[in-house]
Image: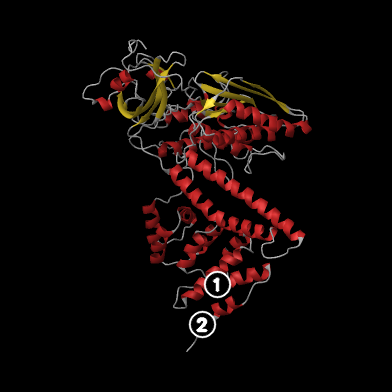
């Protein structure tokens, strides 16, 4: 009984250098290249893993050279398939060397990658079964086809035909072009007696007309008429390069025509501007803001839909509508609208069913009704829950991260406060630093969680009443003391009268500090930041000039925007994140935070004064507004 332990012997040794790696690579190829036999599958798998490990030591050209050597047998289909998925140079060498049977090729070729099948077109010794499989899979030579020869062969009795016969082409030389007499002259030349005696070609096969691209640059002009020998015997130095280029053009044209489908003519004309890109489809409109006048007609809407909406009457009575579902009924009673279904007719972008949320508007002094303001949203728009799912995953991650940070903070405070006994002051200082870092990390986690909940609508700001002018005035006073040593300051113009907001004082203070501290942290030495806070209709608007560090950013709300190395900051994630969180808070409060050129503009709705009451439903001026 004989045991073949050659593969185990080779795997038992470790290749410590490049030379030893190449030797072991050859040994494994020689053993694995034999026809598959019974053996330990784990041992064969270890051999393939060793080949992968050796590939990290041996370069691709060296491996391709080893695979292409003739000193080893290559009869294993499994190894052929394994090499077929390798680098193209290695796969080409392996497929050129493989010696398989007809049945093995027929089973292996469909399992090879498409790129590897293309290498087989270079082999001329494949069995007939393998060739049939390749033909069935569509693997053919992708070289350009040779131009078709002329159907009429030259006559031996025609001296002109003998002159125009193609000379033999040496290997590597460009193919010469056969010039017909019609290409060289417009007028017929005198024909010799031998040519007259030669039989003329049949009328059923007319001579094809020359194409403009077939005229040789070296051919003489039509006048004066050259002699036949001079016109048909160009020198090699003058025609070798032009003829080679022309022959290549003809081969490309033949290849292009061969690829045209049979149902489409080769020279099918195209319509004018047919290749221009079509206009991109308009983005689906899911929601928009609007406002009406006292008569119930839309007089304002978002800019992208204003031309399609302005003038639509929402106050007319709709058919088959209950009082609870009719805009006209709520309009007459000056009632707020919540999730009211309505159907719009008009342009394609606004056609369909919508849901309306709106509130009536009244003048401050007299309490006169002057229209509605609200928002339309699609009734059947698909809810995209990707943002919600992403926010949920982020909140779960933050919950998992808070646990170890809380533990570190707790242990640090225990050490710093000497709860379990006296502790050296050096350790207490380190513990205090760790506790401070942990507190900042937890504050950053809170900001991330707050942003995720605000942007997904899962968090509403606490309602209340606060004066934004007083808050901004106090915060600017605090920041001026910090900016003073850097000779920087805020140049603020704040309205004298109060600006009540429907927000709790802590929410308003947090929003104002987040914006002002971010701007102050990005302010450079000697820089002055202009700031203006004044009411604008039903809103209070804070307009602040961007510091130089933020003004150069393309998107100030991007997370990669940093304010620099200032010690004054509103968060640990940078200026861009802080402004993005402030924007989310402003939008949750019914306002917005946007960039207008070199300024940052915060707009928030004012709280309706308690002294101005809406007009009663039975007022005489209800219809007039």
Residue 572 lies left or right of residue 279; in this view the side is right
Q: Is residue 138 above or below residue 470?
A: below
Q: CA distance from mark 2 to mark 1?
A: 14 Å
What's the residue at 61%, 19% (across, down)?
Answer: 496
Question: What residue would you read off at disc 1?
Answer: 30
Q: Identify the residue at the far front of this view.
A: 611
Q: Is residue 414 above or below residue 605?
A: below
x%, y% of residue 104? 41, 66
Residue 345 or residue 484, whichever sits in front: 484
Q: Count the marks.
A: 2
Q: Which mark is residue 4?
A: 2
Q: Identify the residue at the far left of this view.
A: 320
x%, y% of residue 405? 60, 55
What's the residue at 55%, 44% (across, down)?
Answer: 448
Residue 1 or residue 540, whichever sits in front: 540
Residue 342 lies left or right of residue 33; in this view the side is left
Residue 445 or residue 479, whichever sits in front: 479
Question: Badge 1: how crowded within 10 Å, few (<14), some, or many (20+)?
Answer: some
Q: Is residue 198 above or below residue 319?
A: below
Residue 425 picture quarter: bottom right
Residue 506 or residue 247, whichever sits in front: 506
Q: Is residue 171 visible?
A: no
Tag 2 near tag 1, CB within 8 Å: no
Label located before the other in sequence (2 or 1): 2
x%, y% of residue 238? 63, 32
Q: Give the secondary structure at mark 2.
A: loop
């Amino acid at each position: 009984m004989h045991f073949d332990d050659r593969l185990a012997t080779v795997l038992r040794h470790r290749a410590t250098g490049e030379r030893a790696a190449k030797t072991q690579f050859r040994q494994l190829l020689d053993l694995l290249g034999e026809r598959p036999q019974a053996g330990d599958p784990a041992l064969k798998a270890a051999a393939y893993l060793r080949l992968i490990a050796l590939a990290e030591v041996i370069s691709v050209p060296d491996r391709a050279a080893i695979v292409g050597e003739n000193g080893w047998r290559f009869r294993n289909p499994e190894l052929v398939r394994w090499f077929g998925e390798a680098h193209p140079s290695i796969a080409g060498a392996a497929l050129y060397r493989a010696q398989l049977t007809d049945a093995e090729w027929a089973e292996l070729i469909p399992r090879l990658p498409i790129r590897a099948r293309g290498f087989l077109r270079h082999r001329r010794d494949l069995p007939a079964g393998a060739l049939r499989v390749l033909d069935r899979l569509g693997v053919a030579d992708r070289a350009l086809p040779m131009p078709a020869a002329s159907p009429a062969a030259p006559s031996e009795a025609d001296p002109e035909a003998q002159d125009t016969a193609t000379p033999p082409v040496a290997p590597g030389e460009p193919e010469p072009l056969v010039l017909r007499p019609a290409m060289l002259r417009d007028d017929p030349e005198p024909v010799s007696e031998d040519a007259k005696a030669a039989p003329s070609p049949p009328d059923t096969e007319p001579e094809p007309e020359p194409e403009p691209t077939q005229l040789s640059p070296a051919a003489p002009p039509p006048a004066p008429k050259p002699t036949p020998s001079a016109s048909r015997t160009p020198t090699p130095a003058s025609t070798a390069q032009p003829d080679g280029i022309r022959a290549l053009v003809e081969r490309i044209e033949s290849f292009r025509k061969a690829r045209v489908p049979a149902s489409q003519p080769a020279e099918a004309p195209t319509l004018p501007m047919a290749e221009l890109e079509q206009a991109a489809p308009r983005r689906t409109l899911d929601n928009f803001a609007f406002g009406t006048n006292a008569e119930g007609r839309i007089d304002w809407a978002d800019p992208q839909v204003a031309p399609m909406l302005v003038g639509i009457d929402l106050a007319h009575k709709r058919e088959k509508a209950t009082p609870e579902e009719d805009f006209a009924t709520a309009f007459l009673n000056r009632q707020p609208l919540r999730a009211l279904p309505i159907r719009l007719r008009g342009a394609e972008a606004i056609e369909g069913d919508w849901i309306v949320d709106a509130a009536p508007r009244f003048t401050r002094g007299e309490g006169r009704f002057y229209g509605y303001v609200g928002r339309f949203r699609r009734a059947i728009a698909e809810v995209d829950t990707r943002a919600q799912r992403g926010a949920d995953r982020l909140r779960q991650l933050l919950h998992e991260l808070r646990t170890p940070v809380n533990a570190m903070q707790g242990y640090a405070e225990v050490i710093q406060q000497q709860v379990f006994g006296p502790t050296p002051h050096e350790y207490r200082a380190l513990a205090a630093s760790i506790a401070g870092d942990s507190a900042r990390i937890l504050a950053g986690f809170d900001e991330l969680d707050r942003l995720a909940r605000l942007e997904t609508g899962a968090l509403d700001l606490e309602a209340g009443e606060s004066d934004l002018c007083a808050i901004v005035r106090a915060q600017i006073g605090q920041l001026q003391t910090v900016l003073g040593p850097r000779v920087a300051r805020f140049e603020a113009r704040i309205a004298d009268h109060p600006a009540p907001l429907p927000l709790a004082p802590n929410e308003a203070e947090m929003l104002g500090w987040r914006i002002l501290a971010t701007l102050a942290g990005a302010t450079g030495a000697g820089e002055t930041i202009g700031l203006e806070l004044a009411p604008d209709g039903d809103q209070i608007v804070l307009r602040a000039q961007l510091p130089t560090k933020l003004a150069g950013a393309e998107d100030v709300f991007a997370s990669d925007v940093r304010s620099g190395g200032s010690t004054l900051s509103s968060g640990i994630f940078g200026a861009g994140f802080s402004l993005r969180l402030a924007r989310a808070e402003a939008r949750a409060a019914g306002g917005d935070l946007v960039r207008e050129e070199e300024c940052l503009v915060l707009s928030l709705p004012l709280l309706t004064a308690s002294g101005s009451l809406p007009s009663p439903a039975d007022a005489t001026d209800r219809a007039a507004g």
